[in-house]
């Protein structure tokens, strides 16, 4: 223990059992808060990664779908601005 911590503990012990109990609970809460914060950071990192993968997956689906959907007037696959139509078709399907 460093000197500051040791001084706090000694002062608390001189003040009695209640002060010692308070100091114990205080340090326990600090440790638990640190552990909880680490778990939160891990979860945030994992969820951020999942969101990015989901966005990339949706973009890839839209690109593939836009290339496959034929232009109604020509019957040829569209290569221009078909993402909105592809998105409408993708999300209006019975897959969801």
Image (cartoon, rainbow, N blue to C red):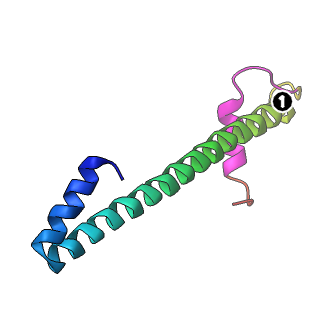
Residue pictured at 65% horizontal, 33% vertical: 84
Residue 57 vertical placement versus 24 (above, below): above
Q: For this rendering, which residue is in front, 81 or 32?
A: 32
- Horizontally, residue 6 falls left or right of residue 51, namely left
Counting from the top left corner in percent of width and height, residue 70 is at 84, 32
| Nearer to the camera, 63 or 35 | 35
Q: Nearer the viewer, residue 47 or 16?
A: 16
Furthest toward the top, the residue is 80
Q: Position of residue 39 (x, y in %)?
A: 52, 57
- What secondary structure predominates along the stretch shown in magenta? helix
Q: Residue at x 47, y 59 (%)?
A: 35
Residue bearing mark 1 = 67
Residue at x 73%, y 54% (from the top left corner):
93
Figure quadrant of the C terminus: bottom right
- Percent across and percent down for residue 14 are 13, 70
Label 1 CA crowd tier, 10 Å (few <14, some 14–19, many 20+): some
Left or right, 7 with respect to 37, comes to left
**Residue 73 within the magenta-colored segment of the rendering:** no
The residue positioned farthest toward the right in the image shown? 76
Residue 57 lies in quadrant: top right
Q: Please give the name of the residue rendered at 86% of the width and 24% of the height, measured from the top-left corner.
A: 74
Q: Is residue 86 magenta?
A: yes
Q: Does residue 84 lie above or below 45 as drawn?
A: above
Q: Position of residue 45 (x, y in %)?
A: 57, 45
With respect to residue 47, does 87 lie above or below?
above
Report the span colored magenta: 77-91
Position of residue 74 in the picture relative to residue 80 (left or right): right
Furthest-left residue in this view: 15
Q: SS for tag 1? A: helix
């Amino acid at each position: 223990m460093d000197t500051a911590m040791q001084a706090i503990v000694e002062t608390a012990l001189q003040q009695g059992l209640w002060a010692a109990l308070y100091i114990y609970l205080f340090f326990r809460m600090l440790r638990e808060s640190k552990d909880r914060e680490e778990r939160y950071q891990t979860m945030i990192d994992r969820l951020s990664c999942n969101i990015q993968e989901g966005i990339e997956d949706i973009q890839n689906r839209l690109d593939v779908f836009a290339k496959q959907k034929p232009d109604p007037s020509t019957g040829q696959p569209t290569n221009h601005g078909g993402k909105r139509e592809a998105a409408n078709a993708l999300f209006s399907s019975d897959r969801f």
